[in-house]
């Protein structure tokens, strides 16, 4: 009996030691990596989880142990991990780090994406989703005379052309499509400058080759090419088609401009659509429309500056066959009509 009691005491003692050692190890494992204050900018990607960011936290010396960090997460099951950039510190420890990440108000850098071909109203919506500014506030700000004058003074590629009263939105087509990161408390001016700085960076690469047309005209035609082209390889060819039309005084007749004129994009348009009285409607008016109809990407801008060498006046995208990704070019209207009948089943 005494022997059994001794064994029991020994086992209990060992278990107690193991528990104490485990608790001490756990507490050390989730403790701060340093006592000194070292701020670390920590970016959480979209769809990340508290478990998936463990290695990233370790790499930045924010946690001592991946295993003990994951143990803490599994025990306390934190929620509300949102995409963004947080300011963490090496003296926080796991508990404080998790508490900081749980509170989305601690996000100090946010991001938004402008895809190619989108419009300034879309840009306003994207920014309003991640800031306290409404889309209406942004659009009104971008139309303010004070801002426009300031931008004309600040940027070489923005001129009085955007002051044309027939332009729907002065800065349509001037915000370069890209992914942007901004501070959560950024002003509308700072956000605007960031997008225009990016356009400045892109256009400056081609500044010496911008000769026959103004930047405003290039961005206007690039926005058309952006909408009309299926593949990147089509962009220089389509740009040349429109330039060929301009050279001979032919109407551009682009559905991209008609869609912008009526604020609706379709596969086919009605006679009343074609007749709409808008300086964006290139079926009614000769020359380039009064301004861009969207945000063109770099490939479309390059296509206008460095167009293909061809003498086509017509092109046809096989929009009814999603697998075709094919654009057909013609030199004459009769050739074009034949291709319309073959690939679309009706005359264009």
Image: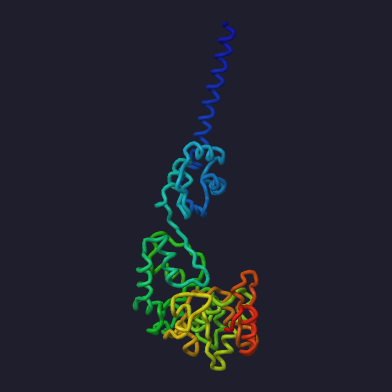
Rendered location of residue 296, percent (x, y): 52, 75
**Is residue 68 depicted above or below 169 in this figure?**
above
Q: Colour scheme used in the picture?
A: rainbow
Figure quadrant of residue 322: bottom right
In-image side of 61 versus 341 (left or right): left
Which residue is pictured at 54% across the width and 23% down the height? Answer: 17
Which residue is pictured at 41% across the width and 59% down the height? Answer: 184
Can residue 40 be seen from the camera position used here? yes
Rendered location of residue 183, percent (x, y): 43, 60
How many marks the image carries: the answer is 0
Which part of the image, by quadrant, shows the N terminus?
Answer: top right
Rendered location of residue 52, percent (x, y): 55, 47
Can residue 197 be seen from the camera position used here? no
**Is residue 9 depicted above or below 278 in this figure?**
above
In-front residue for pair 328/54: 328
Rendered location of residue 205, percent (x, y): 56, 77
Which part of the image, by quadrant, shows the C terminus?
Answer: bottom right
Q: Residue furthest bottom?
A: 248
Q: Residue furthest top?
A: 1
In-front residue for pair 347/80: 347
């Amino acid at each position: 009996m005494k022997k059994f009691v001794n064994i029991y005491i020994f086992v209990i003692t060992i278990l107690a030691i193991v528990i104490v050692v485990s608790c001490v190890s756990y507490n050390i494992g989730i403790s701060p990596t340093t006592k000194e204050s070292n701020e670390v900018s920590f970016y959480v990607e979209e769809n990340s989880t508290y478990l998936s960011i463990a290695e990233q936290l370790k790499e930045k010396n924010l946690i001592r142990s991946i295993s003990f960090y994951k143990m803490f997460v599994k025990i306390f099951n934190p929620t509300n991990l949102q995409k963004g950039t947080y300011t963490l510190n090496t003296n926080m420890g796991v508990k404080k780090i998790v508490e900081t990440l749980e509170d989305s108000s601690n996000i100090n850098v946010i991001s938004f994406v402008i895809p190619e071909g989108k419009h300034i109203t879309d840009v306003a919506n994207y920014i309003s989703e991640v800031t306290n500014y409404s889309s209406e506030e942004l659009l009104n700000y971008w139309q303010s005379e004070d801002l426009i004058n300031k931008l004309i003074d600040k940027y070489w590629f923005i001129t009085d052309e955007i002051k044309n009263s027939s332009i729907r939105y002065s800065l349509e087509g001037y915000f370069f499509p890209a992914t942007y990161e901004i501070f959560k408390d950024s002003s509308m001016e700072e956000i605007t400058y960031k997008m225009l700085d990016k356009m400045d960076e892109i256009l400056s690469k081609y500044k010496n080759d911008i000769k026959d047309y103004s930047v405003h005209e290039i961005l206007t035609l690039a926005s058309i090419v952006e909408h009309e082209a299926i593949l990147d390889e089509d962009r220089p060819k389509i740009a040349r088609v429109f330039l060929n039309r301009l050279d001979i005084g032919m109407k551009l007749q682009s559905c991209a401009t008609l869609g912008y004129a009526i604020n609706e994009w379709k596969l086919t348009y009605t006679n009343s659509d074609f007749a709409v009285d808008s300086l964006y409607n290139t079926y009614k008016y000769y020359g380039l429309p009064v301004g861009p109809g969207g945000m063109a990407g770099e490939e479309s801008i390059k296509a206008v500056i460095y167009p293909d060498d061809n003498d086509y006046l017509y092109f046809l995208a096989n929009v009814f066959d999603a697998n075709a990704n094919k654009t057909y070019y013609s030199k004459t209207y009769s050739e074009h009509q034949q291709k319309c009948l073959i690939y679309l089943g009706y005359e264009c």
